[in-house]
Amino acid sequence: MKSLTISFNHRYPILIYLLVSPFVHTSSQEYTYTIKRTDEEITIDGHLSEKVWDRAQIAMDFTQRSPKDNIPSDDKTIVRLAADARFLYLGAVCHLNEGERFQANTLYRDFEVLQNDAFMFLIDTYAKGLNGYSFEVSPFGSRGERLISNGGVDENDSDYNWENKWFSSVRRLDNSWIIEMAIPLKTLRFAHEVNLWKINFIRNNRSANRSSSWVPIPVNIDIANLSYTGNLQWEQVPESSKFKYSIIPSITTTLTKDYTVPDKSAEKEITPSLDLKLGLGSNLNLDITGNPDFSQIEVDRQQLNIGRFELFFPEKRQFFLENSDLFANFGNDNIRPFFSRRIGIASNLGGNFEAVPIIGGLRLSGKVGNKSRLGVMDVLTDEISFVNEALGSTSVIKGKNHFVATYQYQLFERSTASVLLVDNREVSSDSDMRNSQLVGGQLEWISRGNSWSGSGFYFHDFKHSSSDLSYGLSLRHSTQHFGMFSSFTHVGKAFNPETGFIPRNNVNRIGLAPFYIFRPENPKINNIDVFFDTDHTLSNNFKFLDSRILTGTFLGLSNTSSFLLAINSNYTFLLNDFDPSFSKSEPLLKGTEYFYPSLRIRYRSDQKKFLSGSLELEYGKYFNGKKLTLTSTANLRWQPYLEVEVDVIYNDIDLKHPNGDNQIILIRPQARISFNRNLFLTYITQYNSLQKNIGSNFRLQWRFRPVSDLFLVYTDNYTEDFIIQQRGFSLKLIYWL
């Protein structure tokens, strides 16, 4: 069956196009792969020497996705699949064209697919177009995996922090590279009675800066989108064990010293932990953790916050990740009614966040029917005291029980309705025990062709002394040339759930961002984007509080370099006194308003080069004065073994007297060294002049067997005068049984 194509003459009304486009979609019926069962032993060595590969069906004739879509790909790729009782196998050959060479920046896990030569195997085991998996390899054997939620509409729907056990081998030849994968069926969640899955194969050729896929993907669609998939037809339905389990013990030894407390000796601690992953049939997974330690998690990349509101940092802890979309995707980019990173963290006397010990937790998640998914999580944190010896004061944070339950039901082809309940309670016998609850629901809609998507949510936050609500709507439209995003969010005055991310309450927020993309025939130019991005924050009586209008153009070249030119217009009405210079000068007064436009220019060089980088300059008015912002990044890559990056963000703020001026800077050198596929060293140092702090982190990781690691982590913190504040060592062993 051929793809359905509808073309419109410019004389036809745009209304007809908007009505019809949601139902135009590339058919997947012509893309069907029938997988055969084998009893032959397959060795994952990159040779494809077993006879089963000769008998397997071939998937080839890929279609180019970018820089221009819907044309035959120049990259010859041949893929075969097979299966036995335990594994789903993939064998692929990726040919190179004359003059091309292997491009891969790192051997590190979860590498960036579009920044490297890469092959992706996309799987939707329930054939619903909503949730799936991606398994990825580079020519040098680096691997990555991700969980996909919300149909993979955009990059935010991919969770790269998820990790599981699977196997691969890659062999490089003069003009091709050969891939073998073995994915344990117990790694995947699927319905054992269903013999049809959805799949796609995607290849990225970094030398030519183009990507292609087995099932065609439009250039405006994310490569991990589950709407553009073919059929995986099982001749024999894979069997799933009724009970699957993994035992993951770990032990951490830490040595820390706080130099800010005179004569305080170093503290030693040994922390045993235990995690269990229980597969209850093929659809449900029960995760149990006891006394977890997250010292091996990579540190956050600091952001220079010169605004008035908190910044968002993603969840990285493994316990909270599988099926995390069930819990984390409520709300929108403006608010998150539930944010798991709030669990196990509390604010100390200085207003900074500190880790709170987690005693244990359990999480049940997965499918409970053909169209239903369930998530239940319960986590218990311990009581902790924060001591400020300089002030002679102590703050006690009570232990808490955090309970979260969510239920999702599929509507129509790719839409869902979800409900959420969050209950946070202090673990105390006091009659005045603090508690809070959040209840609400959300609708998510995705059109068949993925050109339209939208959502709506409504949540109510109950506390022992107050309650309030939040609701919102959003609509997104995207085609090869035109796109638009619009949203409305209301946050009540008392809406501030304990385990939510709510940067600002008592506001209404409206956003509208249309754009148009030109794709000229010039082989040196990939795209020219023209955009108009607006974001307005209003009070509950609809008085403008903040407004931003960003308009400009973006030029993307075929050699991966790019250029941006934009005008950024801002308006602010202050509800509280505020010092935009952070210089401890006289603040701008509550009730004053400011309009401050600026010009932004950015150039990014060819990212395939040994040396590359970017430079962005923004200059213009800033409240009642002026601000110059310089953002630069320098990269050095000796592929695939070494990546070095130095980021510098510099702000020169000059306000009218007596409001002060300041120079604020963030410097962040970092490096990743890949000694081989199993031994890595990551390093980052961050200097933030606002915090007057220099912090460093070194992390050595040895993966001695699949998903089993030995970590050695060193951290320190200095004042900007290089006076040591804290220093710590951690040695952590994780063994996946």
Image: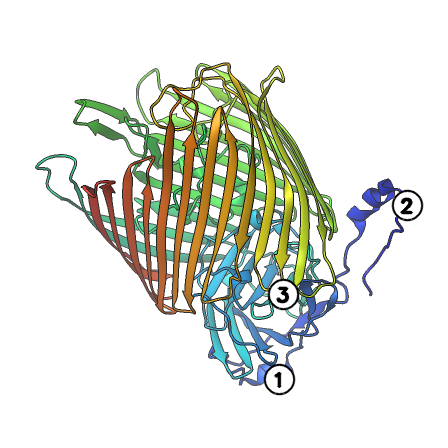
Horizontal arrangement in the rendering, residue 74 relative to residue 589 (left or right) = right
- Closest to the observer: 555 or 389? 555
Which residue is the site of mark 2? 12
User: In this rendering, is residue 592 above or below 344?
Assistant: above
Q: Earlier in the sequence, mark 1 or mark 3?
A: 1
Q: Residues within 10 Å of mark 3 (few under 14, many from 20)?
A: many
Residue sitting at x 41%, y 44%: 649
Relative image position of residue 130 (x, y in whole percent): 63, 50
| Residue extending furthest toward the left | 263
Tell me the quarter of the picture where residue 233 sits. bottom right
From the viewer's perspective, is the residue at label 1 or at label 3 nearer?
3
Looking at the picture, which amino acid does disc 3 mark? Ser
Q: Is residue 219 visible?
A: yes
Looking at the picture, which amino acid does disc 2 mark? Tyr
Q: Is residue 303 visible?
A: no
Query: Whole-Å distance between the Cαs marked 3 and 2?
Result: 33 Å
Query: Whole-Å distance between the Cαs marked 2 and 1?
Result: 52 Å
Relative image position of residue 377 (x, y in whole percent): 45, 39
Which residue is the site of mark 1? 54
User: In this rendering, is residue 654 above or below 37?
Assistant: above
Which residue is the site of mark 3? 211
